[in-house]
Image (cartoon, rainbow, N blue to C red):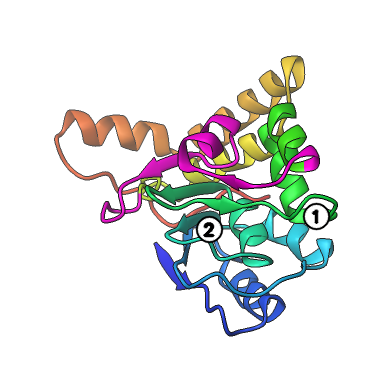
Amino acid sequence: MRTVEWEPGTPGLEQVQRMLEMATSPGVLAIRFSGPRAGSGSLPWQILEAWTRTRAVTVSDLAGDPGFPALEVALCADLVVLRKGVALRLPGRGTVPPAGLVWAAGRAGSRALRRVLLADGVLDGEEVVDLGLVHRLVGAGDPLPVPDPRSGAALTTARDLVRAGASWEGSLALERAAFRLLFALGHPEEGARAFLERREPCFGREEPEG
């Protein structure tokens, strides 16, 4: 897992561009947001959209309320983890919500979208998890819960299926295609064999295209 710290004093656009370069290869990229609330405004949607489509699986570690545009970047990650005791502040009433916040709320569902568009105020940990804006609430000193990266192909494929947002017949077709890809790489057989032999699996270096 690769990690990077969000720096409140550095322009957001510059930081996201740097993180996009780090996220061009498969694996897990974790970003820790721990600095004081600073900054304002929004980032261009073009760069935030690129952030939502990275090759790496992105994980936000919200150890503080960083303000905007950092909060946009955090909520647009594949997985968003919030530390207990941290609250997130929405834009004031009458302010147009930043594009990244609207996208993250849309991904979470209609309840989150209504909350973001029609209300303001502070969201505590339980509320943001209930709305789906944050995926996990953990203790301040707990290790960051990240996916097991030993099979990069399986991790990346699962992430791609989640991002696809398909349903019904479309989702079944994508799932079957993903299964065929992973079996062609030999990862399921190696995982089962390693389990039966009580050893660590060796998945090799091949990753799925996409």
Q: Residue furthest top?
A: 168
| Residue drawn 75% across the image and 54% down it | 92
In this rendering, is residue 185 above or below 63?
A: above
Occupied quadrant, residue 91: bottom right
**Lower sequence index among marks 1 and 2:** 2
| Amino acid marked by disc 1 | Ala
- Numbered range of the magenta stretch: 117-144
Q: Position of residue 154 (x, y in %)?
A: 48, 41
Mark 2 lies on residue: 26
Residue 15 as seen in the image, left or right of residue 148 = right
Q: Position of residue 65 (x, y in %)?
A: 52, 60
Q: Nearer the viewer, residue 23 or 46?
A: 46
Mark 1 lies on residue: 99
Q: Position of residue 155 (x, y in %)?
A: 48, 44
In this rendering, is residue 162 above or below 43?
A: above
Report the quarter where the N terminus lies. bottom left
Q: Residue furthest left?
A: 198
| Amino acid marked by disc 2 | Pro
Check disc 2 and report its element: helix, strand or loop. Answer: loop
Q: Gap between marks 1 and 2, in whole Å?
A: 26 Å
Q: Position of residue 161 (x, y in %)?
A: 63, 35
In this rendering, is residue 141 above or below 118?
A: below
Mark carried by residue 77 = none
Check disc 1 and report its element: helix, strand or loop. Answer: helix
In this rendering, is residue 195 above or below 30?
A: above
Local crowd size for mark 2, using a 10 Å CA cut-off: few (<14), some (14–19), many (≥20): some
Residue 177 as seen in the image, left or right of residue 48 = left
| Residue drawn 62% across the image and 35% down it | 162
Task: Let me know if residue 174 is in the magenta part.
Answer: no
